[in-house]
């Protein structure tokens, strides 16, 4: 098999695995704070192999997420394209950061992500720009914190996977 | 400068093995494309036409996710001792007898209520009016809760806006239809509006959702309205989307705020049963 095609397939496979992992449902509160391994994996691949991650990845997986999450079509592609661009633009700097610094950036990215998807795009509440309330803000903070904690182990797991299977 | 895998220095003509990030032009074009998609979907609800079919395609993924929990359930079932099962069987038999008795009483009550034209019209007894849907996925976004059901019935006539019921009452309506999958807009969704009637005061209102695990509100209720805390809210049937007399929620708080021209009425929706795997789609 063509080396590039094999690499694309292996990256896609890992992302699909993370989507499946994210789909596993617990209680409603746990579902809101459980880490998004798909987004973490997506960020990892953009930083580790930026030359392999193009915008088609972001768009295709974004649409998939839109369907699964019930969001307006285009929300997730927009988020993934932004993440992809920022990750690839600053991956040299990001790679040299300490894990604490990386975790802090992941924390901020996921916090912004949570508040972005809470925007009242459909104008369901004419009096408010966002649907987020205090409870949502608190759960978003916990969500971002958990993601930043999961980042380091996931980084190592994906690094092992990359070194074992993906030939660049 | 080369247009290949790497840049070439203009001064020394040596290769610069730096990875090119996504070009700004491509990024901007993609961004504009996504924003256009977003605006088109908001304006024309384009995605509702295709979401159902998308879920048909994604059905295998949903099924795969179910495998671990099914395996765990099976394992725990096997672990249960035979004796325990016999005990359970006995208690179920007792319960069954009790239920039969209650059921006979309920039938009688239903008859009387039908005469009074208060609750339960004949459509509810019509089994053909309901389709059984198996829960496939519930999105983790509390502000946009979408329930995916697998309605594997070749004769089914599924349409948008058909009400979806749990064992307790109304939980939402069909938002998008595929070949065998439906996406349900849950009553807690911020876009959901349900016409309701209160159980004791018999007052009408419109119940609006604010997200999962959040209280709903009766909107635009005049300050003179005499709703009572603790009374149940049933679907009123107005608007002809939801059938009448199904439980939707319960009034938990009534506030008369001086800066608001309407009453502030908080409503607790009936719980979305997490352990319940099957729901009914009302087709008539």
Image (tube, coloured by chain):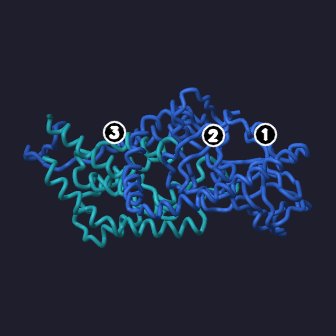
Label 3 chain ID: A
Nearer mark to the viewer, of 3 and 2: 2
What whole-number distance in Å separates the C-alpha atoms at marks 2 and 1? 18 Å
**At which x and y percent is residue B170?**
69, 49
Label 2 sits on residue: B281
x and y, in percent, of residue B284 in the image: 71, 33
Outermost residue, top side: B155
The chain that appears blue in the image is: B
Residue B29 location (% of width, % of height): 40, 38
Q: How many marks?
A: 3
At 38% from the left and 39% from the top, the residue drawn is: A60
Q: Who's the residue at 72% across and 48% down the image? A: B193
Left or right: B32 in relation to B118: left
Q: In the rendered view, tell whether residue A45 sits above or below residue B86.
A: above
The Cα–Cα distance between marks 3 and 2, rounded to whole angstroms, is: 37 Å
Identify the subunit bearing mark 2: B
Residue indicated by mark 3: A56
> Could you give the CA–CA distance between mark 3 and mark 1, rounded to whole angstroms?
43 Å
| SS at badge 2 | strand
A132 relative to B124 in the view: left or right:
left
Q: Which chain is cyan?
A: A
Q: Which mark is residue B239?
A: 1
Asked if marks 2 and 1 fall on the same chain, the answer is yes
The one nearer the camera, B48 or B174, is: B174
Q: Residues within 10 Å of mark 3 (few under 14, many from 20)?
A: few
**Residue A2 screen position, x and y as percent:** 15, 35
Q: Quadrant of the N terminus of chain A?
A: top left
Q: Are marks 3 and 1 in contact (CB under 8 Å)?
A: no
**Label 1: how many Cα within 10 Å (few below 14, some 14–19, many 20+):** few
Report whether residue B36 is seen. Answer: yes
Mark 2 or mark 1: which comes first in sequence? 1
Extreme-bottom residue of the structure: A100
């Amino acid at each position: 098999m063509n080396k590039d095609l094999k690499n694309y397939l292996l990256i896609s496979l890992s992302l699909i695995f993370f989507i499946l992992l994210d789909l596993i449902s617990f209680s409603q509160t746990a579902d809101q704070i459980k880490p998004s391994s798909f987004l973490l994996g997506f960020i990892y691949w953009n930083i580790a192999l930026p030359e392999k991650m193009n915008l088609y990845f972001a768009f295709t997986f974004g649409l998939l997420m839109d369907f699964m999450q019930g969001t307006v079509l285009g929300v997730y592609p927009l988020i993934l394209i932004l993440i992809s661009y920022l990750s690839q633009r600053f991956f040299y700097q990001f790679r040299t950061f300490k894990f604490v610094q990386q975790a802090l950036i992941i924390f901020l990215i996921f916090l912004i992500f949570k508040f972005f998807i809470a925007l009242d795009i459909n104008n369901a509440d004419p009096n408010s720009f966002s649907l987020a309330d205090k409870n949502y803000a608190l759960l978003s903070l916990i969500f971002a914190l958990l993601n930043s904690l999961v980042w380091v182990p996931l980084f190592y797991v994906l690094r092992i996977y990359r070194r074992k299977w993906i030939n660049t | 400068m080369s247009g290949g895998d790497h840049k070439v220095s203009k001064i020394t003509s040596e290769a610069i093995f730096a990875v090119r990030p996504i070009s700004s032009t491509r990024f901007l074009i993609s961004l504009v494309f996504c924003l256009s998609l977003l605006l088109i979907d908001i304006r024309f609800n384009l995605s509702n036409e295709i979401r159902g079919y998308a879920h048909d395609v994604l059905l295998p993924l949903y099924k795969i996710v179910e495998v671990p929990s099914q395996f765990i359930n099976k394992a725990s079932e096997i672990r249960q001792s035979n004796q325990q099962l016999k005990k359970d069987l006995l208690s179920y038999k007792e319960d069954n007898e009790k239920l039969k008795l209650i059921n006979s009483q309920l039938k009688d009550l239903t008859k009387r209520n039908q005469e009074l034209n208060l609750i339960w019209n004949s459509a509810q007894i019509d089994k053909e009016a309901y389709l059984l849907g198996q829960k496939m996925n519930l999105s983790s976004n509390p502000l946009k809760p979408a329930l995916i059901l697998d309605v594997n019935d070749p004769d089914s006539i599924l349409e948008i806006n058909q009400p979806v019921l749990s064992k307790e009452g109304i939980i939402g309506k069909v938002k998008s239809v595929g070949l065998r999958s439906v996406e349900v807009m849950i009553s807690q969704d911020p876009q959901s509006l349900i016409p309701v009637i209160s159980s004791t005061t018999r007052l009408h209102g419109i119940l609006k959702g604010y997200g999962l695990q959040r209280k709903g509100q009766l909107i635009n209720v005049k300050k003179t309205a005499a709703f009572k805390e603790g009374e149940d809210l049933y679907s009123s049937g107005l608007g002809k989307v939801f059938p009448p007399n199904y439980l939707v929620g319960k009034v938990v708080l009534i506030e008369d705020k001086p800066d608001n021209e309407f009453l502030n009425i908080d409503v607790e929706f009936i719980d979305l049963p997490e352990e319940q795997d099957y729901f009914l789609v009302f087709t008539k």
